[in-house]
Amino acid sequence: MLTLKAAGLLDVDAGKIVRPGVLHIDGDRIVGVGEGTAVTDEVIDLGDSILLPGLMDMEVNLLMGGRGENPGLSQVQDDPPTRVLRAVGNARRTLRAGFTTVRNLGLFVKTGGYLLDVALGKAIDAGWFEGPRVVPAGHAITPTGGHLDPTMFAAFMPGVLELTVEEGIANGVDEIRKAVRYQIKHGAQLIKVCCSGGVMSLTGEAGAQHYSDEELRVIVDEAHRRGLRVAAHTHGAEAVKHAVACGIDCIEHGFLMDDEAIAMLVENDRFLVTTRRLAEAMDVSKAPAELQAKAAEMFPKARTSIKAAYEAGVKIAVGTDAPAIPHGRNADELVTLVEWGMPPAAVLRAATVTSAELINAADRGRLVEGLLADVIAVPGDPLADITVTRNVNFVMKGGKVYVNKN
């Protein structure tokens, strides 16, 4: 039995700090909360820190980006071993930043059909190296010339390889069924589809719908019959409306949503993953002019649409789209959401309870008896100053301590 002691702990549901903060840990579970008579073998005293549930990031790309370099189009050509080596460091940085669960959304690289994020999650679970719990999507599903089709950038990167149906390039209902079934066969725990363009779409309007409604319904049908949810990269207001009408569970980004699209999310009980920090932090100055123009159109609308979504009551989960912001800087998303008008308590709920609901993980997201001992500590009250989440000083995942700076 291990006891964690701190100045307080966050009650996510109540949106308040409970003082003092005391947790009793046995194995990988929280077995008691609060001071009492529990017999303990070890006490970790975290002083003036505040305990939080392990944070969650619902959109990362662990196999892209890395320390000391900016994510760029050249990484689209990375071979699979390079991707995996990138992911090892990125996973470690993410965990040590206090993010104990992530969804990895989308591979757009020639892999020979291997689902690298599935393998990454298994290796972390086996203890080969440090990292968060990974909920993998495998290859994102997109049409020829759609968002995440790397051959769009052939003019800038001669030699970029075309992807197969198994690697996510799928056109028409038959190819789409095959692509979705392939991801599920090889361990994907959700399906990601590119429902519209985006900043990194070289051709077409940023918010234009990629797939027909018939094709979207096939993706949803295949995933839902196997018990998987579908996340859709979607920016345009009309694309969001069609995605929701076709049964998509979760909208990624949604920068260009209008009031009608937001109302549909609420009425149909769907999720929105934020990714707002990248609108301030993503450097597109060296990108092709076409991409810079899309960023200039979309980024200013990211602020107004997230404020409207929160005020309307949309289920909001935190996501960064790292490395659009650097791996290990995931908490910057929380800071931006507060700066843009969401209360700190709501942001922390989005990074814990709502994210857990999105991935159907009832075993995490709160500091309560019976749940996984995914616990972090920050040097102050995050309800008063959300920036303390940038300075995590203690990380526990599944009862194992990975960081203790106290």
Image: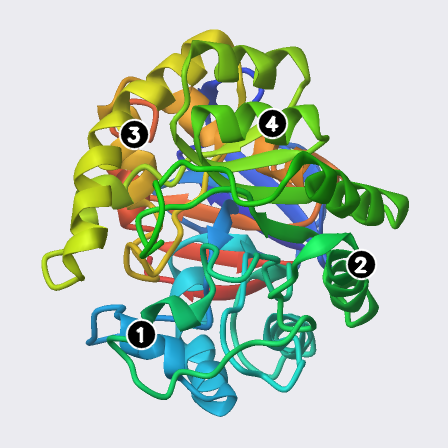
**The C terminus: image quadrant:** bottom left
In the image shown, does 372 or 49 lie closer to the viewer? 372
Answer above or below: position of 377 versus 67. above
Between disc 3 and disc 1, the foreground one is 3
Determine the secondary structure under disc 2: helix
Using the numbered discs, state the Cα–Cα distance from disc 3 to disc 1 in whole angstroms: 25 Å
Three-letter code for the amino acid on which mark 3 is drawn = Ala
What label sits on residue 242 in the rendered view? 4
The residue singled out by tag 2 in the image is: 174
What label sits on residue 302 in the rendered view? 3
Between disc 4 and disc 3, the foreground one is 4
Label 3 neighbour load within 10 Å: few <14, some 14-19, many 20+: many
Using the numbered discs, state the Cα–Cα distance from disc 4 to disc 2 in whole angstroms: 21 Å
Label 2 neighbour load within 10 Å: few <14, some 14-19, many 20+: few
Using the numbered discs, state the Cα–Cα distance from disc 1 to disc 4 in whole angstroms: 35 Å
Answer above or below: position of 260 versus 34. above
Using the numbered discs, state the Cα–Cα distance from disc 4 to disc 3 in whole angstroms: 20 Å
Determine the secondary structure under disc 4: helix
Asked if one can make out residue 41 in the rendered structure from this viewpoint, the answer is yes
Question: Relative to residue 131, is residue 77 drawn left or right?
Answer: left
Using the numbered discs, state the Cα–Cα distance from disc 2 to disc 1 in whole angstroms: 37 Å
Question: Relative to residue 72, is residue 57 drawn left or right?
Answer: right
Quarter holding residue 214: top right
Which callout, 3 or 2, points at the residue further toward the start of the chain? Answer: 2
Please say if the residues under marks 1 and 4 sit with CB atoms less than 8 Å apart. no
